[in-house]
Amino acid sequence: MCGRYSNTGSRADELQRRIADRLGVPLPASDRGFERFNIAPTQEVLAAVEDERGRRMEELRWGLVPDWAGGAKPAFLMINARAETVLERPAYRDLVARARHRCLLLADGWYEWQKPEDPRQPRRPVHFSLAGGEPFCFAGLWSAATSSCTILTCAANEVARPIHDRMPVVLADPAGWDAWLDPRLDGVAVSELLVPAPAGDLSARPANPAVNSVANDGPGCLQAELTLL
């Protein structure tokens, strides 16, 4: 699963402007969604969407609330959707079939927790990112009615697998972004994008155990030698 992630660049960064240009959208006026080191479920996240109103950035709640759920009830919050079954599950199949319900979540890394050899010791967080540290997009699904979203996951690649058997679907190529939002492509066509990122594109490093608490959201989350922020 993917339960925490990061989007550490600022709105003024050249990399963020470049990713907005490649998506064909303006950067939002608000700084919300940027310089985030410990993004957690139920929080507002930055996503690119495309529907009858055009392509744009939206702030969405992370944790999909189906239209039929009648509000943001915790029992219905779905933070991840499995790529292997997204075409079959009633909660997702109509969303993935229509481009207006597909979204791209802006990120530059995510966290997983490694089990220690000694079961008496706590799990240790690991931060995954592209080898060059460039921002990328997670493939996601969203509901306009509830302004909420979920991140698609797939089987882990060789780098991520020693830590967890699942990883988010990372779209690093602008061609993949355009395809995911393309209204001409149906769910079967875009499902070809839902594969693990190449292992050679990914790097992993120890993170600060402070990310265990959603109250901590600063650069120290990525500094493994620190124990407090």
Image: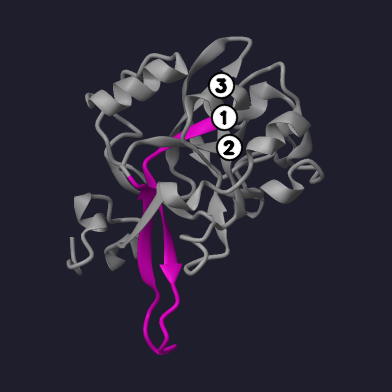
Q: Which residues are magenta?
A: 103-131
Give the CA distance from mark 3 to mark 1: 11 Å
Residue for point 38% across, 14% down: 26
Q: Which badge, 3 or 1, comes first in the chain's sequence? A: 1
User: Which residue is the site of mark 2?
Assistant: 140
Spot the residue most to the top: 53
Q: Position of residue 6 (x, y in %)?
A: 36, 46
SS type, badge 3 = helix
Dot 1 crowding, Cα within 10 Å, few <14, some 14–19, many 20+ = many
Q: Position of residue 194 (x, y in %)?
A: 64, 41
Q: Is residue 30 visible?
A: no
Q: Nearer the viewer, residue 41 or 25?
A: 25
Residue type, numbered disc 1? Cys
User: Which residue is the site of mark 1?
Assistant: 103
Q: Quadrant of the N terminus?
A: bottom right
Q: Nearer the viewer, residue 180 or 209?
A: 180
